[in-house]
Amino acid sequence: MDINQIKKLLPHRYPFLLVDRVVELVPGERILAYKNITANEEVFNGHFPNAPIFPGVMIIEAMAQAAGVLGFATVNKQAEDNTLYLFAGVDGVRFKRQVIPGDRLMLHAEIDSVKRNIWRFNCRATVDEQLACEAQLLCALQEMG
């Protein structure tokens, strides 16, 4: 799935769209996507100019966006359908490796459970097959308007 297809599913836009490509998608089960980390990321102007490190909260957001693509594809919704996945919680977050310019951040998400409109995703982010971050994300599927 290329960036134009991703933009049909996610409401996020520059500079906050953090999924560049979907490599594998099995609706109702799992997704594998990635974010290319470049030296041109706006966040590196302040985090940190002399030692750029992609912020942990941005890694979590990238995992959440990948999970959002999975969720939207699972329920057959698009961004224009006035439906959002909103954070409801983040549990068990662990950071294991710094993410720096030049890295390809691989985003893995699996649906753990769905109860009513609350979705739980098991997520991890890797670089060169090394774990960078893992977390369990809770998202609420919400109709807007």
Image: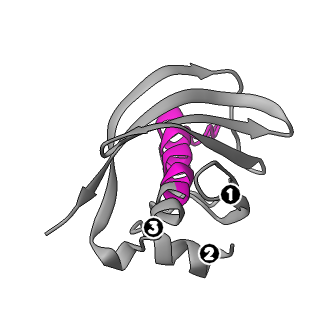
x 30%, y 43%: residue = 116
Residue 39, how many percent across, how many down? Answer: 67, 55
The amino acid marked with disc number 3 is: Leu
Real-space Cα distance between discs 3 and 2? Answer: 10 Å
Label 3 Cα crowd, 10 Å radius (few <14 / some 14-19 / many 20+): many
Q: What residue is pinned by disc 2?
A: 3
User: Camera-side residue: 106 or 1?
Assistant: 1
Q: What residue is pinned by disc 1?
A: 26
Dividing the picture into quadrants, the one containing residue 97 is top right
Labels 3 & 2 near each other (Cβ < 8 A): no
Q: Nearer the viewer, mark 1 or mark 3?
A: 1
Residue 21, how many percent across, how many down? Answer: 69, 66
Residue 114, how many percent across, how many down? Answer: 42, 40
The amino acid marked with disc number 1 is: Val
Q: Secondary structure at mark 1?
A: strand
Mark 3 or mark 2: whose residue is earlier in sequence: 2
Tell me where the magenta segment starts and ends, as one range: 43-70
x 50%, y 43%: residue = 58
Real-space Cα distance between discs 2 and 1? Answer: 18 Å
> Which of the numbered marks, if any, corresponds to residue 10?
3
Quarter of the C terminus within the rendering: bottom left
* Residue 99 located left or right of residue 4: right
User: Camera-side residue: 53 or 140?
Assistant: 140
Real-space Cα distance between discs 1 and 3? Answer: 17 Å
